[in-house]
Amino acid sequence: MNLLEQQAKNRRRTWMVMIVFIALLFFLGYGVDLFYLGTDIPVAGFFAFAIGGVSALASYYSGDRAVLASSHAVPIGEVLTRTSEEDVRLKLTQVENVVEEMAIAAGLPKPNVYVIGDTDPNAFATGRDPGHASIAVTQGLLDALNREELQGVVAHEMSHVRNYDIRLMTVVAALVGAIMLLSDWATRGMRWGGLGGGSRRSGSRDRGGGGAVALVFLVLWIVGIILAPIIGQALAMLVSRRREYLADASGAELTRNPLALAKALEKIEFAADPTESIKRGTASLCIADPLGRKAGLREGFLADLFATHPPMVKRIAALRDMAYAH
Amino acid sequence: MFLLLLPLIVVVLIVLWVVGVYNRLIFLRNQTTNGWRQIDVQLKRRHDLIPNLVNTVKGVMEFERDTLTQVVEARARAVTATGPADAARKEGELSQALGRLFALAENYPQLHANENVKMLQEELSSTENKIGFARQFYNDIATKYNISQQTFPANMIASSFGFKPAELFEITDEADRAVPTVDLSMRK
C-alpha cells in the first residue's frame, strides 16, 4: 500500500466515521421522539442530528485542541521561557530540532511541539492534516531517551502525520469522547424520564399502530444506548492497531535507523506505568498504550480484541528484522 | 456516425493524456526545486553558525589552530559554491573539517562543561542532520522526476516541452567514496 492510497483511505474512513456518528445520534434522538415525546415531527431526532453534525465538524476542526487540552499539553515555547535550567533547555531545544529534522525528511511543514508534564515516557500526534499538526511528548520521554531514540519516536509520529492517520484518529478520539458523554446523559435521562414517559409511550404506540415494530425499535434503541460507548471503543482500537506497524516501518524509512526506534520502544515498554495525564479516549493516538497494560505479556483473542496497540515484542522484532539484527 | 466521431475521441484522449503527463512533470519539477531550496536554507544556516562556534572555542583550543583555520577556509569555499555538484563537494569538505574539530574537542573537558558550546554543538549537529535529511528528500524526489522524464512514452512530452533532468546531490569527492583498505597480513 503506497502513501497516496493510505491517505485516500484515511480520508474516506474519516468521512465514514463522521457519517456513522451522525446517523447513530439521529437514531437515538428518533427513539426519544417515539417513546417520550410522541410528536409527528421528529423534533428530538432533528435536534440530535444537528448536535451530531456540529460535533462531527468540531471534532474535525478542533479535535486536536481538545485532545491536547485533555492531556494537559503545553506548547514547547512556553516551557522554554519558563525554565532557566540549562540542561532542560538543551533537551527541549533538542526535541524541537529533532521534530524539524523529521519534518524535512518527510518534506512537510514543521508541526507544533507540545510537552506533557508526565513522568511516563509516551508521545502522540494529532491534527487534521500536515499543515495543522501537533506532536506531543511527555517529560518522561525526554528524560528516558537519547537523541537518536527520540528521533525514532518523532519519525514514527511524523509518519502518522504524513499518511493522515492523525485526522482519522483525532476525529475518532473526539467522537468517542462525545458518545460517552451523550450516552451518560441518555442513561441518566432514561432513569428520570422512565416514570413520566409511560403514558406518552402508550399514546405513541396507539397512533403508530404497529405495536410489535415499536417494541423492536425500543429494544434496539436501548441496546444502542448501552452499546454505543463499547462500539466507539472497539472502533478506536480497530483504527489504531495495524497503523502502528505501518508507522514504525515508515518512520524507520525516514531516519534509515530502525534500531534506534526499537531501543526507544524497549525503554518505553520497560517503563510501562500508566501515563496518567493521557485520557482513555486518547489512548489509540499514543505510540505506546498509556494505560500501562503490558501488551507483550497478554496473549489470546480477548487480549488482542481489547488492546489499542499491537504487542510491543512483535513491534520490536519487526524493527530488528528491518536492520537484520537477529 | 460513429466512424466520424472516432478520430475526434482519439484526439481528445491524447490531449487529455498529454495534459496529465505535463502537469505531473510540472508538479515534480516544483517539488524538486523546493527540495533544493530546503537544502540551501540548511547550508546557509550552517555557514552562519560556524563563525560563532569558532569564536567560542578559539580561546580554549588554542593549540588546534590548524584545524580551526581549515574549518574557516572550508566554510569560505563552501559559501561560493554554485550548483548541486559543486556544493556537494565543497560542503563535504566542510563536514569533514567540522568532524575533525568535534573529534579534537573531545580532548577538552572544559568545553563540555560550557553550556554555550553544548548548545552550539546541538545546533550544528542538528543542522548537519537537517542537511542530510533534506538531501535524502531532494535525491528521492529528483530521482522520481528524472525517471518520469525518461520512461516511454512520457519522454516524448518531456523532451518536446524542454524538461531537463535534475542534478542529484551526491558525494563526488574521491576521498569520501574510497573504500578503506584493511591490511591483515601482520607484516612488519
Image (cartoon, coloured by chain):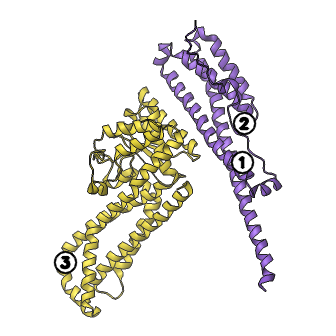
Q: Quadrant of residue B54?
A: top right
Residue B37, quarter of picture: top right
Left or right position of B73 against A170: right
- Return the x and y of residue A49 as percentages of the image width and height: 39, 75
What subunit carries mark 2? Answer: B
Q: Which residue is mark 1?
A: B146
Residue type of the residue flagged with mark 3? Gly
The disc placed on residue A194 is 3
Which chain corresponds to the colour yellow?
A
Chain for numbered disc 3: A
Q: Are marks 2 and 1 on the same chain?
A: yes
- Residue named by callout 2: B84
Q: Name the residue rendered at 28%, 57% in the picture.
A: A301
Mark 3 vs mark 1: give the one in front.
Answer: 1
Q: Which chain is purple?
A: B
- Which of the two residues, A292 or B59, is positioned nearer the viewer here? A292
Which chain hosts label 1?
B
The residue carrying pointer 3 sits among few (fewer than 14), some (14 to 19) or many (20 or more) residues within 10 Å by Cα, namely few
Residue at the farthest top position: B188
Q: Are marks 3 and 2 in contact (CB under 8 Å)?
A: no
Three-letter code for the amino acid on which mark 1 is drawn: Asn
Sequence order check, earlier mark of 2 and 1: 2
Instruction: Find residue B117 and name its label.
Output: none
Q: What residue lies at 31% left-to-right and 87% top-to-bottom?
A: A39
Q: CA distance from mark 3 to mark 2?
A: 76 Å
Nearer to us in this view, B110 or B157: B157
